[in-house]
Image (spheres, rainbow, N blue to C red):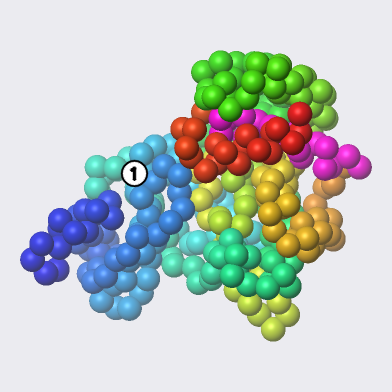
Amino acid sequence: MPAGAGTVLDRFGFTAAELAAVGDRLGAPIVAVRPLTGGYRNRNVLARTASGHRYVLRRYLDPAACAVESALAARLADTAVPVPEPLLADPAGALLGDPLLVSAFSAGTPGDRVIGYGTARDAAGIGAAMGETLAAIGSVRFAGPGFFGPDLTVSGGPVATGLAEFVAGQLPGSNAAAAFSPAELDALQALAERSAPLVETVRDEARLVHCDYNPKNVLAVRDPGGWRISAVLDWEFALAGSPMFDLGNALRFAADRPAGYAERFVAAFRAAGGPLPADWRAVSEAIDVFALVQFLSRPTDHRYFAKAVALLRRRL
């Protein structure tokens, strides 16, 4: 590393000495790094070694998240769910002092970039590929609904329950009052109470849920037959529950995308065996209220705060 590299690289979340330690474990020195987007609570960099191999280094604040992601990657290795191959998992932070996961680099373009810069046909292709992949994700089952422990044991479930109580407890400590009038806040609580019975219809499902499944968290490649998902990223919020969590997330801002995205998504999900109740749209939107209300705790100038306010206001 050149002089001063430690200072520069520290801006990416890794010092030169730390990268040298990781390189030792990989069997070749790391000669280049660049930051990656993604990971709400983590630092991610793409690293290239002297041997020409590329890896993603993911540094966590939460040891449990590191353990869950590495365990899930191992569990999904022999399934149709595309995930980066984990090569080094250190949830205890023995190597760097913080939890670390090193994965093989997965080629592909972020789905949101394809949609943002591609054609309407590209957006529809990403929707279809994501729908098919979501069906594969939901085919992975667990003993019961809940949250994952480090070894993927499930506890604390069911997750899809208590929407009205959740909203009532969440709103007072959030920034909702900065955006909604008192009458609108009452209407928001009423929305939660109307939506709660729909949520309860899927409370006992125990399928794998990514819980942040949207175009920014997938990589896609174009084959002769069209777009396919090469990797699903950022599993830090994964749980066992209903695919309606992921369906609601993926279609949350569908109105801002070409119409073919949502239509092809749902059609491909159904064709690949994804479970769709007759009232799937209402159920997925009801479950998505959990996430939208959580966004109201973000700073009022945060883009997801404004998006959540606009979407919730349309549903009141």
Residue pointed to by mark 1: 99
Residue drawn at x 74%, y 21% as measured from the top left: 187
Q: Position of residue 289 (x, y in %)?
A: 69, 32
Please identify the quadrant where the N terminus is shown.
bottom left
Q: Position of residue 50 (x, y in %)?
A: 25, 76
Q: Is residue 211 above or below residue 177?
A: below
Q: Magenta segment: does it hold 247?
A: no
Residue sitting nearer the eye, 30 or 93? 30
Outermost residue toward the bottom in this view: 224
* Span highlighted in magenta in the image: 278-296
| Among the 4 quarters of the image, the one containing residue 178 | top right
Which amino acid type corresponds to the residue marked 1 in the rendered image? Answer: Pro
Q: Report whether residue 219 is seen.
A: no
Q: Position of residue 90 (x, y in %)?
A: 34, 47
**Residue 67 horizontal side relative to residue 243, left or right:** left
Q: Position of residue 42 (x, y in %)?
A: 39, 46
SS assignment at label 1: loop
Residue drawn at x 49%, y 33% as measured from the top left: 300
Please identify the quadrant where the C terminus is shown.
top right
| Among the 4 quarters of the image, the one containing residue 207 | top right
| Among the 4 quarters of the image, the one containing residue 27 | bottom left
Q: Magenta segment: does it hold 286?
A: yes
Determine the main secondary structure of the stretch shown in magenta.
Answer: helix
Residue drawn at x 27%, y 51% as measured from the top left: 13
Q: Report whether residue 225 is seen.
A: yes
Outermost residue toward the right in this view: 278
Q: Is residue 296 above or below residue 209?
A: above
Residue drawn at x 22%, y 63% as measured from the top left: 24
Outermost residue toward the left in this view: 3
